């Protein structure tokens, strides 16, 4: 088969690596020119998950690891501060891994052909264009958070030794500080109520640092009801998380009403600590829920 993989983000590049030695003829497309090909992301991930993905392509994730997290410092808007012990949450050289996944493949940079043109040439077209969904129908009930992010260089020492987050009132979003080794960090925020740029600018003003890159783009958050019908069992907990966050954002949150969902979310996260890369304690979740 002749396959076009559209978009060289982490999904498209991983697919290219998996299809590398298949019997298919595979061509990757990236709309950005090679010198501006980037990964708009804070580069945080879960070590075990990425280790497994890398293994499947004959790569060692440790070659791309930047910061192996120990504690995530949390500051709630009611000034409650606490640390969450981490077990796998880390940052990695995401762009480096993407480029490595595709280094031996045919990639056409700086082009985003129309679907009709692609259909003439390829048997299969895979849309890996992320938020853009350039070749897929638009989501009917889309829900997304606007984000803003800087990559910052700290010549005189970093302000935090590990991950740091500040959830916004009503859980409408959060500010993040993701360490990138000795001198760098990604700082950014996403907020339904659009305070993300203000929060990022305030952190920069307070802690200094030189901005070396500015990135901003919305993040999708899906209403999992539609997925639930098809794969109800697997995704049912995410629908609970969505309802929880939505009630918070819309000021329609009642803890007693949300208690069954809260317990279900806690039990799911506790059981899947390795998947979330952190130690899950009910006390920590309560602080987050109450803020
Ligand atoms: C500010 C910010 C911070 C984030 N931080 C994290 C984090 O720390 N950890 C995490 O796991 N997730 C994070 N995310 C989410 C993460 O970036 C996405 O989930 C992830 O990038 C999705 O990967 P993808 O390969 O599907 O799409 P993308 O990474 O968006 O890649 C899509 C690619 O397709 C290209 N493209 C678009 N249209 C076309 C077209 N028509 N033809 C050809 N190419 C096209 C784009 O240029 C891009 O290279 C963050 C998102 C944002 C916005």
Image: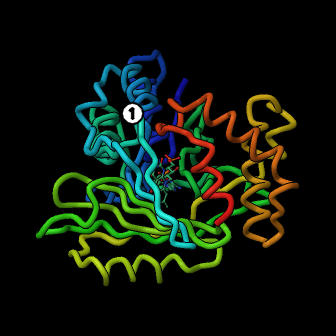
Taking the image as shown, residue 163 lies to the left or right of residue 235, namely: left
Taking the image as shown, residue 97 lies to the left or right of residue 196, namely: left
Taking the image as shown, residue 59 lies to the left or right of residue 123, namely: left
Query: Foreground residue, 236 or 19?
Result: 236
Q: Residue at x 81, y 65 (%)?
A: 253
Q: Residues within 10 Å of mark 1 (few under 14, many from 20)?
A: many
Q: Residue at x 24, y 79 (%)?
A: 208
Query: Foreground residue, 11 or 209?
Result: 209
Query: Foreground residue, 250 or 131?
Result: 250
- Residue closest to the far left: 156
**Image coords of residue 225 (percent x, y):** 84, 46
Q: Is residue 13 visible?
A: no
Mark 1, residue position? 47
Query: Foreground residue, 122 or 201?
Result: 201
Taking the image as shown, residue 28 lies to the left or right of residue 103, namely: right
Q: Residue at x 26, y 31 (%)?
A: 62
**Image coords of residue 124 (percent x, y):** 60, 33
Q: Is residue 232 visible?
A: yes
Q: How many callouts does the rendering have?
A: 1
Q: Residue at x 51, y 72 (%)?
A: 79
**Image coords of residue 51 (percent x, y):** 38, 27
């Amino acid at each position: 088969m002749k396959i076009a993989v559209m978009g060289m983000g982490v999904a498209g590049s991983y697919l290219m690596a998996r299809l590398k030695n298949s019997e298919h003829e595979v061509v990757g497309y990236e709309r950005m020119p090679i010198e501006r090909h980037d990964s708009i992301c804070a580069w945080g991930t879960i070590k075990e998950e990425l280790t497994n993905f890398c293994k499947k392509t004959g790569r060692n994730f440790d070659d791309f690891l930047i910061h192996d997290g120990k504690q995530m410092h949390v500051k709630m808007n009611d000034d409650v501060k606490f640390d969450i012990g981490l077990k796998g949450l880390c940052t990695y050289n995401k762009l480096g891994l993407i480029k490595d996944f595709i280094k031996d493949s045919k990639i056409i940079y700086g082009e985003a052909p129309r679907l009709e043109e692609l259909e003439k040439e390829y048997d299969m077209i895979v849309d890996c264009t992320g938020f853009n969904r350039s070749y897929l129908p638009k989501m009917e009930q889309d829900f997304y958070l606007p984000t803003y992010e800087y990559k910052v260089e700290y010549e005189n020492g970093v302000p935090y030794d590990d991950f740091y987050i500040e959830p916004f009132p009503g859980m409408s979003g959060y500010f993040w500080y993701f360490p990138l080794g000795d001198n760098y960090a990604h700082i950014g925020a996403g907020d339904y109520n659009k305070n993300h740029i203000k929060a990022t600018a305030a952190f920069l003003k307070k802690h200094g640092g030189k901005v070396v890159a500015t990135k901003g783009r919305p993040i999708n958050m899906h209403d999992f009801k539609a997925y639930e019908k098809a794969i109800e069992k697997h995704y049912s907990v995410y629908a609970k998380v969505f309802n929880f966050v939505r009630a918070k954002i819309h000021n329609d949150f009642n803890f007693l009403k949300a208690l069954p969902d809260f317990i279900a979310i806690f039990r799911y996260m506790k059981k899947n600590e390795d998947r979330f890369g952190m130690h899950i304690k009910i006390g920590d979740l309560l602080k987050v829920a109450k803020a």
